[in-house]
Amino acid sequence: MRKLAIFAAALSLCGAAHAADVSLLNVSYDPTRELYKDINAAFAAQWKQKTGDTLTVNMSHNGSGASSRAVIDGLDADVVTLALAYDIDAIADKAKLLPSNWQKRLPQNSTPYTSTVVFLVRKGNPWHIKDWPDLVRPGVHVVTPNPKTSGGARWSYLAAWAYAEKKPGGSWEKAKQFIAELYRHVPVLDTGARGSTTTFAQRGIGDVLLSWENEAHLALKEAGGDKFEIVYPSNSILAEPPVAVVDKNADRHGTRKVAEAYLQFLYSKEAQEIEAKDFYRPRDKDILAAHARDFPNIPLYSIDDVFGGWTKAQQVHFSDGGVFDQIYKPGQ
Amino acid sequence: MTPMLRPRAPTDDHPLTKLVLSLVAVGFIALFLLMPLVTVFWEALAQGMDSAIAALREPDALSAIQLSFTVAAIAVPCNALFGLAAAWCVTKFDFIGKNLLVTLIDIPFSVSPVVSGLVYMLIFGLQGWLGQDLRDHGIKIVFALPGIVLATIFVTFPFVARELIPLMSEQGRDEEEAAVSLGASGWSTLRRVTLPNIKWALLYGVLLCNARAMGEFGAVSVVSGHIRGLTDTMPLHVEVLYNDYQYAAAFAVAALLALLALVTLGIKSLLEWQFAGEIAATHSH
């Protein structure tokens, strides 16, 4: 009933003023700055053609956890495009701004693109880093953000864990030891992925950066090609950064229709091509195949298979007193 | 042993000691104050004047500049008024809890700005005490201009009052008491006796307050929501640009901030020089 009223209101608005100015607020995570700049321009053009309305998509970027927290505290997002499902679960759970089954509303777990965790090393790979065990060799310094605030950091942590638990002879206990050893090699924890990239690339700290695949490619591109190399480990994790309409906010603003169209657009051929160009792995098989050179086919563990889903992973590893708190002792 | 008979140097230290001490002081200032300032301008102009100016004319940069000026234009007058009122209360009257008030005024100096931002979040955030009511009435505080202004007012609270209180307590109440005994009203005592005595200190306070209001990062960062082109102030925009790999543009905006601070200091020095005599008269010590 309420939806109908809003729809009617929207219709009458459309009738009254032909070319309305509409705006959406997309609250996102750190490394998507370039991606959504491109997506927003493409979608606004399409929306203008379809409806005549001039659409402005405003952006707010932060570490995924920090962005989630801001929306819970009242940052008026029409849509959220975060680094991992738990951060949207938190919005559904703590602020009740969208239903808890939000992830079922769009195809493929509401993730139009995926990514993974790779290593970025300095040109020539002076430490000969090829796979996860090389990260804990004496003298190697690893840069990765804080898993408490950064989505990318949590994916990196889980990728390392999955490797250590699933390798021949691996176990939960051995994985915990490996992770503890790994974080002893981390000199500084930034709050977000982009902060860590800047620490590694611009300030020259560390020998290897655990990074989103898209972030590593971008750093490579920004640096002009001959300063860094990307190393793909023997296996990594399937990172699914999901998207959702924030129902209560969108309904209050009367923007549900355009917000839903915006997220649908992310699955279109046009958007998938943009995502691939910005180094996110597109869901579309043909477009993925066309960009296969940028996305080497390595085995990727899924969070459901190894960790029993995000809720459980978050609780076991990243909650207060969880495994990360037990193993991370700064300054040792 | 005959210090009264010959004019003495300020200290008896060896000339070499003095030289070393002076060099250390100058070196310290150069290293920690001058060098960063020079670096900011150097980096800003690394790709030429044109690209620095172009960076400042980007819509998001213009919006950040405008927001910073708007925030300062609201916060500084508020704090000037409050600072004057508080200094007047504390120095011209006796009342119970006076020391407590003086201590309270200093709180923003001692509390981390991030904490103050979080406090506003606890009060006005959607999960905070007033959040749901505000939303039901369509009032936006945090993640919008009012929240940014509130956070800035909090952080710059003490600047004017702290500048005025020592001066006013030194000047005492004699002149005001004389004015009142001659039949002046409270208002005209303030306007014709107190204000002329403190106008320079008041102006300094306002200038410092303004510089800090434009430059505040921590508290504003918590309540801003970082919406580009809407709620990013100049300092926040510097961080955004830096993290966007736009280093020259980041330093261009940073240089503009530094320039504003330098202009503020310049005005202060100019006033001191221009009105040296008058200032000495009100600072009668």
Image: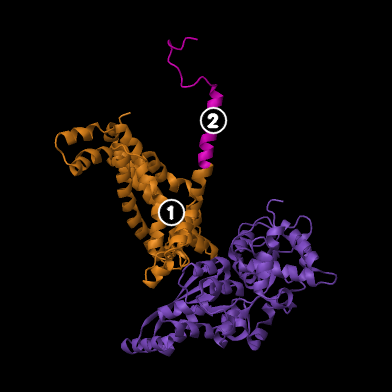
Chain colours: A purple, B orange
Q: Position of residue A110 (x, y in %)?
A: 59, 82
State the residue at coordinates (44%, 54%): B216
Disc 2 crowd rating (10 Å Cα; few below 14, some 14-19, many 20+) is few
What amino acid type is highlighted by mark number 1?
Answer: Gly
The single residue placed furthest to the left in the displayed view is B183
Parent chain of label 2 = B
Q: CA distance from mark 2 to mark 1?
A: 33 Å
Residues drawn in magenta: B1-30
State the residue at coordinates (50%, 83%): A262
Q: Position of residue B34 (x, y in %)?
A: 49, 44
State the residue at coordinates (43%, 86%): A3
Left/right of residue B180 with respect to residue B207 in the rendered view:
left
What amino acid type is highlighted by mark number 2?
Answer: Leu
Q: Position of residue A321 (x, y in %)?
A: 67, 60
Disc 1 crowd rating (10 Å Cα; few below 14, some 14-19, many 20+) is many
Instruction: Please name the residue that numbered disc 1 is placed on.
Output: B215
Q: Looking at the image, can residue A141 be seen?
A: no
Q: Looking at the image, can residue A7 be seen?
A: yes
Q: Position of residue B277 (x, y in %)?
A: 27, 33
